[in-house]
């Protein structure tokens, strides 16, 4: 009798997952809604409505005086410069760590099999390097750039530099993670062929790995640069220079019409960067 | 002098699959050998052991009289440099220019810095040009590799081996993805190179006809072991029938599929 029951039981066990997870998902959703205090009705209450109205109407007309626009030119440029420098530092951090954090580069796969079997200590080192790189990347990106900026402002003072460092470190962690995923997905047959010529790991990397992933690599980096422009504006709020600092000042002064101008400038900058990176990607 | 000595070489990818099941083979320096046998017989795996990509699960492997199973690091790379491989799928880097794929044969001789600089400003252009001329596609030197036809890419792969200048050339199904006439041209090219330079040549071939007409020594491989190891005029029809029994007869036309290493037969 057992033999007849068992197969149907195991079949039922397989298909039990949806029944198990649908309620779990619903519970998680309802609970999150409640605990995150999601309440769209607040918009309908008099106070919220009034404040929102004040904020929105206060924004018009935007301050387009030559004087204000001229004053904002430098902070706007500063935001771009922070994003460029920050992204460059992020590449410097993310590229090597992403490479070492690639499993097929550091620990396993056809490039490591023979070496690891020949030398057990090498395998141990490989794992140490791999997990080390991954741990550093996780640390860098798990701390929000806002918090990094806060710490760097304490360390190096107000101004654009802490913003650069914050973007460099936080985005370095993100870039490194994605780089390693891009590297991981590469076709390893050309790598095997390069290895068979006696090439070392770095040579294989530059001749086999990088050329194969270059379009992906560049387009993701450009995407991160777009994000960095936005982020560098936000970082200004904690005193790390750029447009954000101006937004913060205008907010504090209740000069809402300046805020709309600043948001407009930010929009144009992000759109421009988006356009530039789309053009570059089209060439690849 | 002995180039290769294999004693009871076994390779298994997991407990149930034996890709190579105890091969004994001795290869003299300068010899030219064709390996034939049904697909999935373990020929590709054997070649990946011979070029020190994979390590045998058990058995002894000697190259030039010295054991190589425990090599690692620099010594392993130096030994690999002595063995050039031409792959079935060419295994070139598609987005690189032809010249860089050819020059990658020099990587074993170059420092890492020099290799990277060469990607920007190619070194040893004359060497690459000569090698490409030898295989007949010197005009493609600055073309992007993925713009070339399959046969041209296979020539680039051979040019890469020429620049590597190894003692041994292993060619794993080098002609399975090109048409009949080109196939014999490429096999002839490999044989000429071996004759002129005295390099040992081992070729995996799907085509029995090519194997018998160009190679004096023919090794039949089936189920991961050698079935026969004879001079080509001793290979009889019965032996061939036995070699391919249980498999569809094969020729160049129907074997353009990709023989995945690592997924061999069940023993």
Image (cartoon, grey):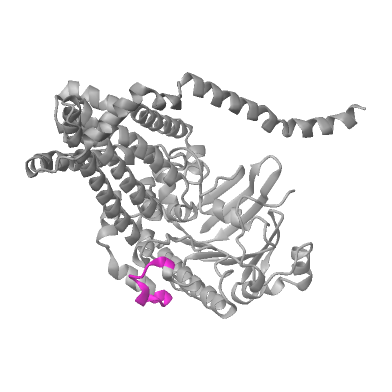
Q: Is residue B150 found left or right of A15 in the rendered image?
A: left
Residue B137 is a magenta residue:
yes
**Which residue is rendered at x = 37% and y = 74% of the image?**
B140
Residue B12 on image: x %, y %:
65, 44
Image: magenta residue range: B133-146
Would you place residue A21 above or below residue B248 in this image?
A: above
- Quarter of the image for residue A31 reads top right
Would you place residue A277 above or below residue A18 in this image?
A: below
Q: Residue furthest top?
A: A35
Would you place residue B165 above or below residue A173 in this image?
A: below
Residue A165 can be seen in this image = no
Instruction: Give the position of the C terminus of chain A as an image quadrant.
Output: bottom left
Would you place residue B202 above or below residue B232 in this image?
A: above
Q: Residue furthest right?
A: A1
Question: Depth check: A109 or B190 in front?
Answer: A109
Q: Residue furthest front?
A: A46
Q: Residue furthest bottom?
A: B181
Question: Depth check: B76 or A89 in front?
Answer: A89
Residue A190 on image: x %, y %:
46, 56
Residue B245 on image: x %, y %:
78, 64
């Amino acid at each position: 009798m057992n033999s007849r029951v068992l197969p149907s039981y195991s079949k039922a066990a397989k298909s039990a997952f949806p029944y198990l997870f649908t309620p779990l998902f619903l519970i998680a959703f309802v609970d999150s809604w409640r605990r995150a205090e999601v309440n769209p009705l607040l918009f309908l209450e008099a106070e919220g409505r009034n404040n929102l109205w004040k904020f929105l109407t206060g924004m018009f007309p935007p301050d387009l005086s030559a004087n204000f626009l001229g004053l904002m030119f430098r902070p706007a440029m500063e935001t771009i410069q922070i994003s460029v420098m920050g992204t460059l530092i992020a590449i410097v951090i993310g590229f090597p760590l992403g490479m070492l954090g690639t499993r097929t580069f550091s620990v396993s796969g056809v490039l490591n099999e023979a070496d690891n079997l020949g030398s057990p200590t090498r395998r141990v080192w490989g794992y140490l390097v791999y997990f080390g790189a991954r741990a550093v990347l996780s640390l860098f990106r798990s701390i929000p750039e806002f918090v990094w900026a806060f710490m760097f402002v304490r360390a190096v003072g107000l101004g654009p530099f802490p913003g650069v460092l914050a973007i460099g470190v936080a985005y370095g962690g993100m870039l490194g993670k994605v780089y390693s995923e891009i590297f991981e997905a590469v076709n390893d047959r050309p790598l095997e062929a390069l290895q068979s010529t006696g090439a070392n790991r770095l040579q294989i990397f530059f001749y086999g790995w990088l050329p194969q992933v270059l379009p992906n690599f560049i387009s993701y980096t450009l995407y991160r640069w777009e994000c960095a422009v936005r982020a560098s504006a936000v970082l200004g709020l904690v005193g790390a220079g750029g447009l954000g600092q101006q937004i913060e000042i205008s907010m504090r002064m209740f000069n809402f019409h300046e805020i709309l101008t600043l948001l407009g400038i930010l929009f144009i900058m992000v759109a421009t960067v988006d356009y530039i990176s789309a053009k570059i990607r089209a060439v690849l | 002098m002995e180039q290769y000595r294999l004693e009871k070489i076994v390779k298994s990818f997991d407990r149930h699959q034996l890709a190579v099941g105890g091969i004994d083979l001795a290869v003299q320096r300068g010899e030219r050998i064709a390996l034939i046998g049904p697909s999935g017989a373990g020929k590709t795996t054997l070649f990946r052991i011979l070029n020190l990509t994979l390590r045998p699960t058990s058995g002894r492997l000697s190259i030039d009289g010295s054991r190589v199973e425990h090599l690692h690091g620099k010594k392993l790379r130096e030994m690999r440099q002595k063995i050039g491989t031409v792959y079935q799928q060419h295994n070139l880097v598609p987005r690189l220019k032809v010249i860089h794929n050819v020059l990658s044969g020099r990587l074993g001789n170059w420092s890492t810095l020099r290799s990277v600089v060469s990607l920007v400003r190619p070194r040893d252009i004359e060497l690459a040009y000569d090698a490409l001329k030898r295989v007949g596609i010197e005009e493609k030197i600055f073309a992007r590799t993925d713009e070339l036809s399959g046969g041209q890419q296979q020539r680039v792969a051979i040019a890469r081996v020429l620049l590597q200048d190894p003692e041994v050339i292993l060619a794993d199904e080098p002609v399975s993805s090109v048409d009949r006439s080109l196939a014999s041209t490429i096999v002839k090219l490999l044989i000429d190179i071996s004759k002129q330079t005295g390099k040992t040549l081992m070729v995996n071939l799907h085509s029995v006809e090519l194997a018998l007409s160009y190679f004096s020594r023919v090794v039949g491989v089936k189920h991961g072991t050698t079935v026969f190891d004879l001079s080509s005029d001793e290979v009889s029809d019965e032996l061939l029938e036995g070699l391919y029994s249980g498999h569809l007869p094969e020729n160049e036309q129907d074997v353009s599929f990709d023989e995945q290493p690592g997924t061999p037969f069940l023993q």
